[in-house]
């Protein structure tokens, strides 16, 4: 078992003990995803078969104006992969990477369901809130 596998295994055991469940993740809890996780999942969907770390980071920056660190993107990708929301594969890295393969990400059905549920919750919260009034209250 290498260091990464050991870290995942240790985290899995800690979560299992903490949650009281035998499964790695509590499905109901994990269906609630944060805003950055939403952005990463949406970027993966938008990029399709070109979804790798740097492209995801650039997609988020271009669409939101938010400059995320590559480390934050990869940490989120690893977390979403561990939850079973994303599938990871490898592809050619090219000359810039010295021939090292890139990790490409694709959405899995549980990820699509979690993203849809999260966006629907947000939509329900926004429903009936006039954004002009919200801006005056917050501003």
Image (spheres, rainbow, N blue to C red):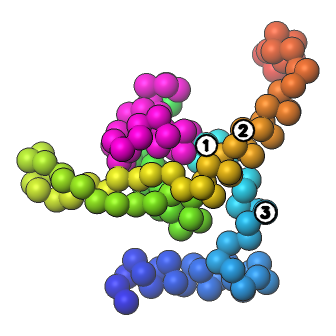
Mark 2 and mark 1 in contact? Answer it, CB < 8 Å.
yes
Q: Position of residue 80 (x, y in %)?
A: 55, 59
**Magenta stretch holds residue 108:** no
| Disc 3, SS | helix
At a point 47% along the width and 34% down the height, the residue shown is: 46
Q: Which residue is mark 1?
A: 38
At a point 41% along the width and 53% down the height, the residue shown is: 105
Q: Is residue 118 above or below residue 27?
A: above
Q: Position of residue 136 (x, y in %)?
A: 84, 12
The span shown in magenta is 39-64
Q: Which quadrant of the figure has residue 110? A: bottom right
At a point 9% along the width and 54% down the height, the residue shown is: 98
Badge 1: how crowded within 10 Å, few (<14), some, or many (20+)? some
**Magenta stretch holds residue 57:** yes
Q: Which mark is residue 119?
A: 2
Q: Is residue 76 visible?
A: no
Furthest residue toward bottom = 1
Badge 3: how crowded within 10 Å, few (<14), some, or many (20+)? few
Q: Which residue is mark 3?
A: 28
Upstream in sequence: badge 3 or badge 2: 3
């Amino acid at each position: 078992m290498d260091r990464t596998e050991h870290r995942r295994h240790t985290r899995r055991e800690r979560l299992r003990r903490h949650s009281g469940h035998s499964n790695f993740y509590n499905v109901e809890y994990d269906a609630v995803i944060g805003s950055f996780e939403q952005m990463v999942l949406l970027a993966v969907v938008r990029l399709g078969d070109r979804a790798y770390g740097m492209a995801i980071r650039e997609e988020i920056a271009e669409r939101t104006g938010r400059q995320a660190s590559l480390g934050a993107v990869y940490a989120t990708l690893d977390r979403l992969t561990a939850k079973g929301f994303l599938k990871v594969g490898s592809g050619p890295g090219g000359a810039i990477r010295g021939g090292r393969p890139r990790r490409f990400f694709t959405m899995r059905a549980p990820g699509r369901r979690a993203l849809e549920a999260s966006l629907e919750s947000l939509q329900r919260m926004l429903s009936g809130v006039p954004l002009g009034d919200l801006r005056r209250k917050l501003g």
